[in-house]
Each structure stands twice: as structure tokens, then as C-alpha cells.
Amino acid sequence: MLTLAIAKYSKELRLSRNIADMSTRIQAGSHQEYLLKLLQSELQHRDVARKEKLLKNAGFYAIKTFETFLFDEVTLPSSIDEQYLKRLEFMDSKTNLVMYGNVGTGKTHLSIAIGVEACKKGLDVKFFRTSTLVNKLAEAKNRGALSVFIKQLNKADLLICDEWGYVPLDRTGAQLLFEVISECYEKKSIIINTNIEFSRWVNVFYDEQMTGAMIDRILHHCHLLMFPGQSNRMRESSLSQ
């Protein structure tokens, strides 16, 4: 009778399907034990569903993990190791990561692996190609919804900007990106993937003073990860045979 009642109320109250499914499967010696097991199952179900939603909404264009990343192809600062990254310790201190190296050397892979791990821990991650982020900012500004979009970005625990500097920005785009970086400063961690050395960032953002201020904010609390190798895509292609 109790299982039938739970299934009935789950449907009427639009509770998760897990409640109805598990109500017929759980075995217990008392009503109290039964309800406890059912609640535990529901909490676990909701936790899994939330993390799946975080992964879906993060914006990753492919799912990459630490299991397929080779750490011998990246030079880490002497103060950190791969476990520091896997445990997301940099996020505890709102420290940024700048991943610098040639195209195809693993920067995107590592940044996504970190982002996926953050989602698994229940953290909100937003991943963008930098040009896409700037376009979304410009579109939001044109619609009069810039503050709403920036508030959405501010809810994220980690912001990942891929292909930073690959596409030159106009003054408005640079200003909008600077606003996002300023909003993140000492509030959340940012990961930036780039093949552009710091001295050349001014060629992307054009305004020397704003570029300097942006670099200052990014590097104040930051680890620089170097990717000195050859492009993995070129190495694996028939051209390199």
C-alpha cells in the first residue's frame, strides 16, 4: 500500500520518476527504513541529474578527461603538480590558469578535463571560444540585456576562454571582454588558452592601457602552463608520416 501511495503522489506532485521507480524496488524491514532508503535514493538521483545538467550547460564542444591527457607534454610551474590541477585547488584561492603554446598541443583538452572535473564536483562551469563569448556579449548589449548576461556569467564558478587572441577584436568587443575579466577578478578562476605571448596581446585588443590592465588582473593570481610541443593533430595526421 505504501509503495502504491508513493507512486500515486509522485505522479500527482510531479516528483522525479526515480521516486516511483524505486518505491517498488526498495526492500526494508520497517516503514522508517523504507522511507530513509527512498529519500537517500532520491537525493542521489537529484545529485546525478544536477551534475549531468552542469555538464550539458557548460558549453564543452567535446568531453575530454584526465584519463586521456598526457601530462608529460605540458610544463607546469614548480609550485604545482598534476594532482593540484585534478583536485581543482587553484579554484579555492580564485587563482587563474593561462595555458600557452602552439595550436593543437593539448591546451583545450586539459582545460575541458578540468572543467569536467569541476562539473562532477557540482560546480558551475562556462566554456567559450573567446570570439563566441565576445559575440554573445555584443548581441546582449544590442538587445539591452548585457547586465543580464553578465549576471549569468557571474554565477559560474569557473570561466574557460579557449582560443584567446585567435581573432582580433574591435574596440567594443575588447571593452566587453575587459568588463567580464574585471567582474571575475578575485571572485572566480579563469582559464585562458592562447598561442599569443603577453607582449602581443595589444595587437588583439589594440588599446594598450586596457590590455595592460587586463593582463594585470589575469596575472595577479595565476599559474602559467607551457605547452612547448608540436601540434598533436599535425603529428597524428598523414602529413607527418
Image (cartoon, helix red, strand yellow):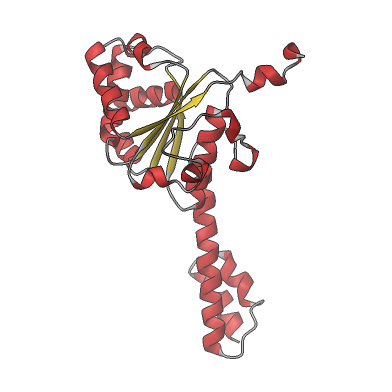
Q: Considering depth in this image, is 70 or 1 the residue closer to the camera?
A: 70
Q: Is residue 142 visible?
A: no
Percent of width and height locating residue 208 = 25, 11
Viewer-side residue, 223 vs 158: 223
Taking the view exactly as shown, the residue that stands out farthest to the left is: 209
**Horizontal and vertical percent for residue 134?**
38, 23
Q: In this view, does 207 lie to the left or right of 118?
A: left
Screen quadrant of the N terminus: bottom right
Outermost residue, front side: 78
Q: In this view, does 38 lie above or below 224?
A: below
Query: Residue 157 vs residue 81: left or right?
Result: left
Q: Is residue 239 visible?
A: yes
Q: Which residue is drawn at 54% across and 58% down?
A: 48
**Which residue is depicted at the point 53% across and 43% down?**
116
Q: Choose between 135 and 62: the one closer to the eye.
A: 62
User: Would residue 172 be found to the left or right of residue 166 on screen?
Assistant: left
Number of numbered discs on residues: 0
Question: x%, y% of residue 144?
Answer: 27, 28
16 versus 36 height, above or below: above
Closer to the camera in the image, 74 or 78? 78
**Residue at figure coordinates x 52%, y 46% from the top left:** 117
Q: Quadrant of the C terminus?
A: top right
Where does the image place residue 237, in percent across and percent down from the top left? 72, 17
Which quadrant would residue 235 be assigned to in this image? top right
